[in-house]
Amino acid sequence: MEDAIADIATVFHWQPNVFDEMELEELMQWREKARERAEYQE
């Protein structure tokens, strides 16, 4: 789960406290969005 948070924070520049209230499913959805955005930027 720490890798997912790191991926999202790197792409969207979110602070760690944003993730405190997220369910795992939501976290994984944001990780996928971060992956897509990171791929697009390369």
Image: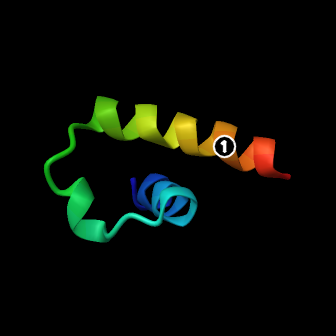
In the rendered image, the residue lying farthest to the left is: 21
* Three-letter code for the amino acid on which mark 1 is drawn: Arg
x, y percent for residue 4: 47, 52
* Of residues 42 and 20, the one drawn nearer to the viewer in this rendering: 42
Above or below 13: residue 7:
above
x, y percent for residue 11: 57, 58
Above or below 17: residue 12:
above
Here the colouring is rainbow
Drawn side of residue 9 relative to residue 10, left or right:
left
In the rendered image, the residue lying farthest to the right is: 42
Drawn side of residue 23 relative to residue 30, left or right:
left
Count of numbered circles on the image:
1
* Of residues 6 and 39, the one drawn nearer to the viewer in this rendering: 39
Q: Which residue is mark 1?
A: 37
Secondary structure under the numbered disc 1 in the rendered image: helix
Q: Residue at x 21, y 44 (%)?
A: 22
Q: Residues within 10 Å of mark 1 (few under 14, many from 20)?
A: few
Q: Residue at x 66, y 43 (%)?
A: 37
x, y percent for residue 18: 24, 59
Q: Residue at x 46, y 63 (%)?
A: 9
Drawn side of residue 8 relative to residue 14, left or right:
right
x, y percent for residue 1: 39, 53
